[in-house]
Amino acid sequence: MRWTINGKISYILRKSFTFKFQSKIFPMSDKYKQVLTVLQSAKAEINAILTDPDDELHRIRLTNNLQKDHDNLALLTKSGDLVGEPVQGLKPAKKIGGKLIGMHKKAKVDLKPSEEKVNVLKAKVETAFEAFPNTPAKEILKTYDDLVIRGVAKKVQMKVTADDPAKITIPFINDIKKEIKVFTEKQTAAAKGKAEAEQGKTKQADGSASGTDAEKVANNAGTDSAADASDKKSDANDLL
């Protein structure tokens, strides 16, 4: 901050008046006066030394801290000027160690798991699904991680999400085992029904084929009889 000569004189006069006024109200100890003077002198020396633009951040921090210490001491001991100079505001740092600070770009986070991870999880769920019925609940809790257990519950169409239930418990695992039994029975019944339906279609197709063969035999027999009759008639004509 650049000051004019008149501005400097006006500032010194104001400081002098404030100092004399406060000295009358708050008697000042010489040792605290000396400390306050040292703090102000240190601040001035720091401002004189750190003049390079790259030093601005360090200069502001150091002088601000000194000013705060000055004001706190003056307030607590009622010594000297209780109203210090305004603390300088920190400006956004553009350089550190002489190097420009670039704006940080937000990294794009892909929340969708890779196909490989999905396939690995599916394989683990299938393995756990097969093992659940014959494995004690406590052992399941120790062996399989949270996500795999939830995956098995999802497979048997239980209402489950990544955070519901909040914690995997023994009763929850026992519920999964019961649902696996129901799910397996339904799958078995469905497979049996499908097999029976396929078998029925096969029998129907075989019956249709047998009827067609019988018709062919009957047609062939009729044709043969007609041919024999024609041959006999021809022989009779030859004899006559």
Image: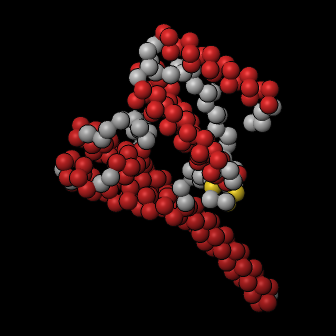
**Image spot of residue 159 (x, y percent):** 42, 36
* Number of marks drawn: 0
Colouring scheme applied when the structure was drawn:
secondary structure
Which residue: 32% across, 46% down?
A: 180
Task: Give 68 or 36, whichever is nearer the viewer.
Answer: 36
Q: Is residue 28 above or below residue 194?
A: above
Q: Is residue 236 above or below residue 166?
A: below
User: Image quadrant of residue 195?
Assistant: bottom left
Task: Give 107 or 42, whichever is nearer the viewer.
Answer: 42
**Image spot of residue 229 (x, y percent):** 71, 77
In the picture, which quadrant includes the C terminus?
bottom right
Which residue: 23% across, 52% down?
A: 142
Task: Give 108 or 192, whichever is nearer the viewer.
Answer: 108
Which residue, as the protein is rendered here, is positioned at the far top? 25
Q: Is residue 102 left or right of residue 203?
A: right
Which residue: 59% across, 53% down?
A: 110
Task: Give 169 or 2, whichever is nearer the viewer.
Answer: 2
Q: Is residue 103 left or right of residue 112?
A: right
Which residue: 69% across, 53% down?
A: 52
* Residue 24 visible at all: yes
**Image spot of residue 188 (x, y percent):** 37, 51
In the picture, which quadrant includes the N terminus?
top right
* Residue 104 visible at all: no
**Image spot of residue 9 (x, y percent):** 74, 26
